[in-house]
Image (cartoon, rainbow, N blue to C red):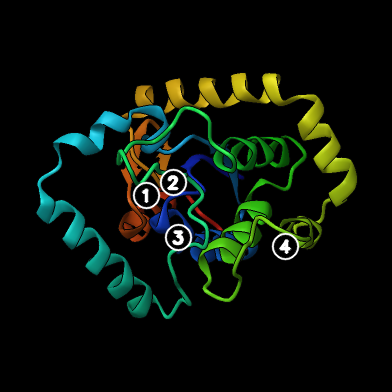
Amino acid sequence: MTLTYDLYWSFRSPYSYMIMHRLTALEREYDVVCNVRPVYPLAVRTPEFFDTRDPLWFSYFFADIHREAQFLGLPFRWPRPDPVYMDMATRTYPKEQPHIYRLTQMGALAAEQGKGLAFLDEVSKTIWGGTVDDWHLGDHIAQATARAGLDPAAFAAKVDAESERLDAVIEASQVAQRAAGHYGVPMIAFNGEPFFGQDRFDQFKWRLEQQGLTAR
């Protein structure tokens, strides 16, 4: 029996990037299917979340993401540019964002076209993998789209034409995410149980095995 799970995931989350190689390998090797549900990052949804963080939250976060990437053997660098724009003068996140809305809409459309996991994997490696400067310029995202098995021109045109509908799809995913048990990413929901964080992958797989996970 094919097992399915929901994946709530953000293009601005380094930990979302760090779980992708395990999720793609899982689906390649086992009879399991991911229902990809991209969501907007907290910096866009609830920017006030960061206003109340202790300074140690930020210093630990930045130390941990580099350590975790090294531990997992993943190439990593904070994106250039950041997928979420911050006004450095005011230290706030403007409502108008040049990148994250369209990226997330692209992820939602890729999921609808059956290429969600591949698209998230290819684009996140482009953004977070440390080898691409100015990932938002030129054909970097188009090339990642093609590697995910989608036609870049047709796909981009459909995102542009259906941006409002896709935004509603993302909003529905954000509501479903909270109903499933958490607000952060990456979050997996399986059999009514939330698994928040890339470091919960082994527990998630353990649950799959309990439910009869079989090799392909």
Q: Nearer the viewer, residue 143 or 22?
A: 143
Amino acid type at circle 4 is His
Q: Amino acid at mark 3?
A: Ile
Q: Which mark is residue 207?
A: 1
Closer to the camera: disc 3 or disc 1? 3
Q: Are marks 1 and 2 in contact (CB under 8 Å)?
A: yes
Q: Is residue 183 above or below residue 34?
A: above
**Quick one: quadrant of the C terminus?**
bottom right
Quarter assignment of residue 67: bottom left
Residue 114 percent across, percent down from the top left: 74, 43
Task: For label 4, count other residues whose C-alpha is less than 10 Å away and answer few (under 14), some (14-19) or many (20+).
Answer: some
**Amino acid type, label 1:** Arg
Tag 3 and tag 2, C-beta contact below 8 Å:
no
Query: Residue 211, which numbered label?
Result: 2
Nearest to viewer (mark 4 / mark 1): 4
Could you say whether the residue bearing mark 4 is in a helix, strand or loop? helix
Q: Which tag, 4 or 1, sits closer to the chain's start?
A: 4
**Residue behind mark 3:** 19
Question: Is residue 96 shown left or right of residue 86?
Answer: right
Going from the N terminus, do you reach mark 3 or mark 1 first?
3
Q: Position of residue 126 (x, y in %)?
A: 61, 65
* Image quarter (top left, top right, bottom left or bottom right) of the N terminus: top right
- The structure residue drawn at horizontal position 15% and vertical position 52%, both measured from the top left corner, is 57
Residue 186, numbered circle: none
